[in-house]
Amino acid sequence: MILVCGGLADPVTELVCARLDACGHPYRLLDLGTYPAGFRIHWRWHGARPSGYIAGPDWKVDLDELTGVYVRYLGTEGRVRPDGVADESIPALHAEYDAGVTALLEHLPCLVVNRLGGGMSNHSKPYQALMLQQCGLRTPPTLVTNDPAAVCAFQATHGEIIYKSLSGVRSIVRQLGPDHVARLPLLRHGPAQFQAFIPGDNVRVHTVGDRLFPTRVRSTAVDYRYARRDGAEVDMAPAELPPAVAESCLRASRALDLPLAGIDLKVTPDDEWYCFEVNPSPGFLYYERHTGQPISLALADLLHEGAPASRHDPAFVR
């Protein structure tokens, strides 16, 4: 049995459920948009692993029956009461609900896509960059600072540079222009990440288990996710990766413990490949819709087939 943890108001979660239905793979939905209303989770430690059950309005699944779990946390957004009205309860309560679910999912011996622990590297982009380098992926020249003078020196060395957030909080990537330079004194209130601008095409690689789905993205926008906001177009198509880059992407997803990952690359006109970061909860619907790549089908099959013993299984011997 497959367990889906997410909210149907989230289109990615909805797609996963629809794909499981289409494939005939049995699953149950733990709707985090309404949880805990209508759901019960009861578990305790049995030796080195959790034992118990999860129950919904008209179903009950023992934890030992689970072959795979897909989870996509909602945070405080997207939560509704059973009557469909937006839930305005104290956010701390929702955080406690999520913490309880997370504690269970982190220790299930079955495949979990993805455990929260696997995505923690995304909360520190410099740390994640070090891990990516260890996996054989090249990262752009990078500066992390709250010193305006250091930024100016970095720009003098590399010419065009971009800036972005340091953490997992979503931010819009922008090139540093004259207007931004004038605001650099504000940087002393909090550091940011600056990188040399890499020309070329973006390539988003979705890893699903041992499968790769690379998508080449052509756009004049610095951050193609917001291309329309900037009056730019986006063109997407399936791509091919050099074997060494493909192997490094798989190595990175395994090292980060992410059965599903969205890896952001860029290839220069000279065919040099750079990696910016890894998204631990990728919204792959956007890419599947534009390219027809069967990412959700691969995910549904992965959840159905489960996975061999992992480092989370106490029976696994390194």
Image (cartoon, rainbow, N blue to C red):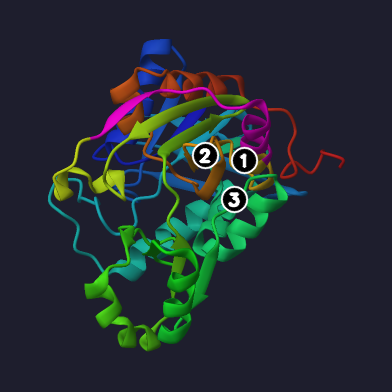
- Cα separation, mark 1 vs mark 3, equals 9 Å
115, above or below 309, in the image: below
Please name the residue that numbered disc 1 is placed on.
253
Callout 2: few (<14), some (14-19), or many (20+) C-alpha neighbours within 10 Å? many
Highlighted magenta segment, given as a residue range = 234-251
Question: Disc 3 vs disc 2: Cβ atoms closer than 8 Å?
Answer: no
Q: Which residue is drawn at 44% across and 36% down?
A: 204
Residue that mark 3 sits on: 118
Q: Position of residue 63 (x, y in %)?
A: 59, 36
Left or right, residue 50 beside residue 119: right
* Label at residue 73: none
The local crowd at label 1, few if under 14, some if 14 to 19, many if 20 or more residues have their Cα within 10 Å, is: many
From the viewer's side, name the closer residue of 224 and 211.
224
First in residue order: circle 2 vs circle 1: 1
Give the quadrant of residue 313.
top right
Query: Is 259 on the left or on the right of 201, as rendered?
Result: right
Q: Give residue 134's position: percent from left, percent from top.
A: 72, 51
Taking 164 as reference, is 300 above or below it?
above
**Sequence-first tag of 3 and 2:** 3
- Circle 2 SS class: strand
Report the residue that reaches farthest toward the right.
317
Q: Let me know if residue 143 appears in the view.
A: yes
Q: Where is residue 57 in the image (x, y as percent from the top left)?
A: 33, 35
Q: Which of 56 and 147 is in front in this view?
A: 147
> Are the two marked residues, 2 and 1, in contact with CB atoms closer than 8 angstroms?
yes
